[in-house]
Image (cartoon, helix red, strand yellow):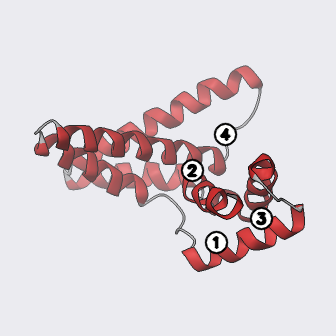
Amino acid sequence: MSLRTQIMDDLKTAMKAGQSDKVSQIRGITAKIKDLDVASRVKNAEVTDTDIISALRSMIKSRKESATMYRDGGRPELADKEEAEIATISGYLPPELDEATLKSAIEEAVAATGATGMKEMGGVMAALKERFGADLDPAKASGLVRARLA
């Protein structure tokens, strides 16, 4: 089952169950997918699960930033709402790689690319993306690669 199908099925289930908060959260996800569809028409390309996962990761990143700003601004109820959306969106992401696996993969990628400094970080990240695809969290991986190459 594709990710898009799973999201639409979950939307239907939430609507039938009368879960208005979850319906609202999933509709936000479907709106982002529709934005991807519109953008892909210009390129005559098809939106893949990898594209959707990338968009979901960016949605989580922006919601984390918003939640932090709401907490700092004394609006915990809005921060809680953002965190609930993060939990819903995270349910559609593949499981994260554990840190030990990621670190060993980084060591292999550094050895394979011959990277010795920060200038070669792009090559290491490309090797990791090729190996893990959508399972790789680029933000987490880039921090570990940066630490390794520094």
**Which of pointers 1 and 3 indicates the residue nearer the eye?**
1
Q: Quadrant of the N terminus?
A: bottom right
CA gap, disc 4 to disc 3?
Answer: 21 Å
User: Which residue sits at x=75%, y=32%?
Assistant: 45
Under tag 1, what secondary structure? helix
Q: Amino acid at mark 1?
A: Leu
- Judging by the rendered image, the residue that carries numbered circle 1 is 102
The amino acid pointed to by label 3 is Arg
N-term mark: 4 or 3: 4
Q: Is residue 116 visible?
A: yes
Instruction: Look at mark 3 in the image and give the residue it sits on.
Output: 131
Residue 28 position by quadrant? top left
Q: Secondary structure at mark 3?
A: helix
Q: Nearer the viewer, residue 48 or 128?
A: 128
Which mark sits nearer the N-terminus, 1 or 3? 1
- Percent coordinates x, y for residue 75 in the rendering: 12, 39
Measured in 3D between alpha carbons, the distance from the residue under mark 4 to the one under mark 1, in whole angstroms, is 27 Å
Q: Secondary structure at mark 4?
A: loop
Front position among marks 3 and 2: 3
**SS of the residue under disc 2:** helix
Q: In this rendering, which labeled residue sits more in front, label 4 or label 3?
A: 3
Circle 1: is it few (<14), some (14-19), or many (20+) Cα within 10 Å? many
Please report whichever mark, 3 or 2, sits nearer to the chain's N-terminal start: 2
Q: Which residue is mark 2?
A: 53
